[in-house]
Amino acid sequence: MESKTTALPRPTGAAANEAAAPLAPGAAVSAGPFPERGPALDDIAETAPSAVGEIVARARAAQRAWAEVPIGERAQLIAKVKRRLLAQTEEIAALLHRECGKPIEEAALAEVLPNADLIDYWTVSIEELLDESPVDLDAIAYPGKAGRIRREPRGVIALITPWNYPVAIPLRTIVPALLAGNAVVFKPSEITPRSGALVASLFDGLLPDGVLAVAQGGGDVGAALIEAGVDLVVFTGSVATGKKIAVACAERLVPTSLELGGKDSAIVLGDCDLERAARGVVWGAFTNAGQNCASIERVYVEQSIADRFIDRVVALTGQLRAGIDVGVMTTARQAEIVRRQLDVALADGAELLAGGAPEPGSLAFPPTIVKVEREDTPLLREETFGPVLPVLVVKDVEEAIARTNASRFALTTSLWTRGYERAHALARQLRSGVVTVNNHGFTGALPAAPWTGTGDSGFGVTSSPHALAELTRPRFYLEDRSRAKGELWWYPYTPALRTIAFAMARVRGGAGWLGRIGALVELVAAFARRLLGR
């Protein structure tokens, strides 16, 4: 790192005591505000924006050597991260509990265990996925020529990630990016700097210096990263910030991968398994206190089962234990956004069925359900990113799909039904990048499955071989072993060459059968003249 750093604020008073105290199994998250949840780590420092250019320069120098390391050796090194990750499961869960407000179980299940699978997937499959592929060339049109495609690393990747899943989200890019031969400069959220530092520490001693660097800080550090001349920016976060990054990158012709917001819907059909649908929707709405781009933020339920479904969702929500099943919100700013959206919806006539906003200043926002009729309210139009679930009754599934697709967001949608064939047909009508049947929101943890969206949800892809289209670039190699002194299309341009060009167009489909036969005769004569240089 750079010597010009400013220490991030350390916890004081009660916050410091909370951070240092051991966490008892099953302990509940405090319901009060958290001015600072992180443990007192002395080595967390904020990076000066002026230092970012040097960090990127060191990463670029290190990347050249890293890309020369055989892929199998890179995979063997990074595979060691899995054991380190799993060995620190309790430490990571405790840190996420303190820094983000997550329940311990949720932290381990969502941020540690899936990433062990991710490391296995990429380290086992990367050689095959990056293996060069041949290009078929017509031996008559291109005699003596052979081509192949290789996936080359982008170079230096800037990775800017949010605070809601501060371990899982970075690793989904860091692992394949490094395996592909890139260097990564990683800027974690300024809300969760300690989680970001922990992620980087998992690679300590495994990589050459500079291949993975951390730049701690806020938006000014992220802007400096883009200005430093990176080769790709991978960003997960808000739509507003994503658009600013897209503009800044466009001005520099730097490619971007943007995974932005969501306004995900669950569509509950009349033939669903009602108990499973209700339980799945409650989990999909309130896991991580709703702070998830894939949270269910709209439920469209068919009228035929609406009353029974709503009653069951309300009952299940009432069984959730504050601080054990559902954690607190991470930031006061986000809690206030959720409060404002809920207040406007209620003022517009929404019916409060469960929960409600907490006292001002509290991050313990209870799971809240509202029955809504009108779509023109921020609670239905904007990303909420909090534990509020609007339920809307619709006449049929066609109305539900039309309302789902009307949103400017299109990340994930879940269909709840026993009719699987029908569900497949309905899925093709949806705009969403991910569609699940009888489940919701967990597929981001599947390393072989692409996570992507459209519209204001962005166009980035994480996980699966499709992610390599962003983390690498194709390079085409052609070798020519022809012994001819020249090519047909080389100089000089002659009348015979013109005849060949026009006759070939007719032979290849530009004329009828008789025309093609005539063109073949012309070709034979023209080739003979061409060989004589005419």
Image (cartoon, rainbow, N blue to C red):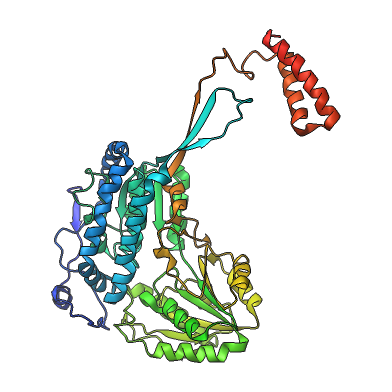
Where does residue 93 sit, x and y in percent of width and height? 25, 70
Report which quarter residue 180 is drawn in. top left
Question: Is residue 329 placed above or below 458 in the rendered structure?
Answer: below
Residue appearing at x 20%, y 47% in the figure: 2
Q: Residue furthest right?
A: 514
Of residues 455 and 506, the one nearer the viewer is: 506
Where does residue 339 sit, x and y in percent of width and height? 41, 80
Q: Going by the image, does 78 lie left or right of 352?
A: left
Question: Is residue 340 placed above or below 410 in the rendered structure?
Answer: below
Residue 66 showing in the rendered view:
yes
Report which quarter residue 163 is drawn in. bottom left
Where does residue 442 sit, x and y in percent of width and height? 42, 69
Residue appearing at x 34%, y 69% in the figure: 110
Question: Is residue 306 placed above or below 477 in the rendered structure?
Answer: below
Report which quarter residue 202 is drawn in. bottom left
Of residues 389 and 85, the one nearer the viewer is: 85
